[in-house]
């Protein structure tokens, strides 16, 4: 099956076309640019893979957590492609995709025992998004928390398991996350390849009609305006 994998949870969007176990083409794209540029990047990957959108069997999207704006752009783009091509849309966790990239890196080094992978992305506002995975399966619910709380949370989920870390959070919170730095793999953001591979291995549920990004935490607008009224003043207490 030919699957387009797309993840825009971070500023470095991952795009790839996977044919079962083969990666036909992949790239990275600056997702801080216009959404129209994302479509251009997708089209470029399709051309390099020699696959027309109508030849795709499915579209796979990293649903988050991550940048709210990036996730909305990615979901809308993936839905548009899936709808136009008449193909299903499959969604996976962006943190799970990031962890899957880490697994592939570890597997490339046969001397390493497969560890539990902790995927950690910078969530801004002094927080991180975190997920803990063993053989691509989550050990618990994904969380948004302060970097200083990461160690205790991991210990609760993984105990004394051998750990490896992936994600861009180390660069953003290097001082706090320094105790984990020597176990941090060279994987910063989710790839389109990982999104497609996880979607192929998953339940393949079509979310074209009702799919939505996974934000985990409320947006700044929801916090400031809990009544959802545009222009409303924050509640006084």
Image: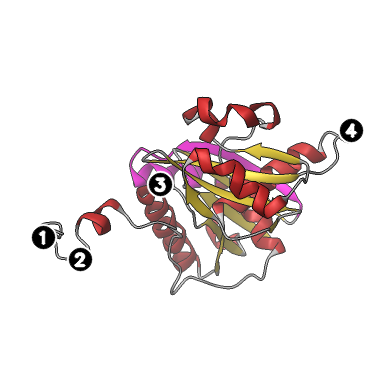
In the rendered image, which quarter is residue 2 located in?
Answer: bottom right
- The vertical placement of 209 against 29, above or below, is below
Q: What's the magenta region?
A: 21-45
Q: Which residue is mark 1?
A: 232
- The dot on residue 67 is 3
Q: Do callouts 3 and 4 mark residues in contact (Cβ within 8 Å)? A: no
- The dot on residue 46 is none
Q: Which residue is mark 4?
A: 111
Q: Quadrant of the C terminus?
A: bottom left
Of mark 3 and mark 4, the one earlier in the sequence is 3
Q: Do callouts 3 and 2 mark residues in contact (Cβ within 8 Å)? A: no
Q: Do callouts 4 and 2 mark residues in contact (Cβ within 8 Å)? A: no
What is the CA distance from the residue labelled 3 to the residue labelled 1?
Answer: 24 Å
**Within 10 angstroms of label 1, few (less than 14), some, or many (20 or more) residues?**
few
The front one of 114 and 189 is 114
Going by the image, does 189 lie left or right of 219? right
Q: Residue at x 68, y 62 (%)?
A: 200
């Amino acid at each position: 099956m030919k699957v387009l994998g797309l993840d825009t949870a971070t500023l470095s969007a991952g795009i790839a076309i996977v044919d079962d176990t083969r990666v036909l083409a992949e790239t990275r794209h600056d997702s801080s640019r216009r959404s129209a540029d994302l479509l251009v990047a997708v089209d470029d990957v399709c051309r390099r893979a020699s696959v027309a959108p109508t030849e795709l069997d499915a579209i796979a999207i990293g649903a988050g957590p991550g940048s709210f704006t990036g996730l909305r752009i990615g979901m809308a783009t993936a839905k548009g492609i899936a709808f136009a091509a008449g193909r299903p849309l499959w969604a996976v966790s962006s943190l799970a995709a990031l962890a899957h990239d880490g697994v592939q890196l570890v597997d490339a080094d046969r001397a390493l025992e497969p560890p539990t992978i902790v995927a950690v992305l910078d969530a801004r506002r002094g927080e991180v998004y975190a997920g803990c995975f063993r053989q691509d399966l989550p050990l618990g619910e994904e969380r948004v928390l302060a970097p200083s709380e990461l160690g205790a949370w991991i210990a609760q989920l993984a105990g004394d398991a051998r750990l490896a870390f992936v994600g861009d959070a180390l660069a953003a919170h290097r001082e706090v996350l320094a105790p984990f730095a020597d176990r941090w793999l060279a994987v910063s953001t989710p790839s389109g390849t990982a999104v497609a591979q996880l979607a192929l291995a998953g339940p393949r549920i079509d979310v074209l009609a009702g799919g939505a990004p996974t934000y985990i935490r409320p947006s700044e607008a929801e916090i400031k305006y809990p009544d959802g009224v545009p222009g409303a003043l924050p509640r006084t207490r």
